[in-house]
Amino acid sequence: MPRDIRAELLKQARRPASWLLLAVAVVLTLTFGYAVPYAGLGGAPAAGGPGAGRGLSAMLPDAFVGSALGGLPIFVGALALIFGVLVAGSEYGFGTWKTVLVQNPSRVTVFGAKLVVVTAAALATVLTLFAATAGASALVASLQGQALVWPSASDVLLGLGAGWLVTAMWGALGVLLAIGLRSVALPIGLGLVWLLAVQNLLASVAAPLLTWVAELQKVLPGPNAGALAASFGASAPGVGQIVGSGQATVVIAGYLVGFAVLGGWLLHRRDIA
């Protein structure tokens, strides 16, 4: 397993797409968490609109944890899903599964190495987002003449853990879709449709009209990711306190384990080709 993990880490580190996905996550988080709200400080966002919670207080250092987590339910989650698809699905696209497995590692070992790399990348992504938002919040405080008041170390660590859990879940879903569909393009397309369209339509259109959809929201991965982010003060589309942070953590952890187990089972039981 350690050799497989090292090989997979080296492979993904040398892939430009991995670094591009990380860069896009940082740029989007800073753009919609700081640049756009800061440019609109003089205006008045519509009550209840997506920017209603992004006043100056939301851009100061004591709120940077929520700013780092705000994109996890949608766009950062989508990027993590794409990374997971690339880690597992590229082997189908390049026809390299047989090349890897003929060198004697078991399918479970190779799958475990890929999952370790996806979770490690999730942690690296969250750490990078925390560093970027902490720097941006310090810059905003300096420009506005505000004191540098930071959240407690425990809040930061809890936020890191929550962000890691959510990002790893989306990455594991990407791995599962890639193995289940044995490709790259279709899993990415279906994953993005779910993340960027279906779950938003369920929340904004179906849930207000159908009680059973509103209840279903409480056990879906996206709304629970949004609820967990909201518990740290995040304010962004897809973020809302529909369940408590404890339930959200349990649900997301359950999805992470479920995606991992199902992906490993599929790879173990099905033909590679």
Image (cartoon, rainbow, N blue to C red):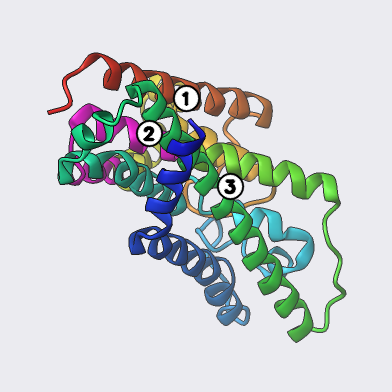
Residue highlighted by disc 1: 255
Front tag of 2 and 3: 3
Region rendered in magenta? 170-193
Quarter of the picture containing the C terminus is top left
> Crowding near pointer 1: few (<14 within 10 Å), some, many (20+)?
many
Which of these two is toward me, 262 or 149?
A: 262
Q: Amino acid at mark 2?
A: Leu
What kind of element bears circle 3? helix
How many angstroms separate mark 3 from mark 1 (CA)? 17 Å
Residue 148 against residue 62 in the figure, above or below: below
Residue 18 percent location from the top left of the image = 39, 58
Q: Which numbered circle lies on residue 246?
A: none
Residue 70 falls inside the magenta stretch = no
Residue at the location (61% across, 38% down)? 228
In the image, residue 31 above or below residue 86: below
Q: Are marks 3 and 1 in contact (CB under 8 Å)?
A: no
Image quadrant where residue 20 sits: bottom left
In-front residue for pair 38/131: 131
- The quadrant holding residue 200 is top left
Position of 104 relative to 10 (above/below)? above
Looking at marks 2 and 1 on the same chain, the residue that comes earlier in the sequence is marked by: 2
Residue furthest toward the front? 103
Q: Residues within 10 Å of mark 3 (few under 14, many from 20)?
A: some
* Residue beneath disc 2: 173
Kind of residue indicated by mark 1: Tyr
Which residue occupies the extreme left position in the image?
273
Callout 2: SS: helix
Dot 3 or dot 1, earlier in sequence: 3
C-alpha distance separating marks 2 and 1: 9 Å
Q: Earlier in the sequence, mark 2 or mark 3?
A: 3
Q: Residue 32: percent from the left, percent from the top? A: 51, 67
Locate residue 254 relative to residue 95 in the image: left or right.
Answer: right
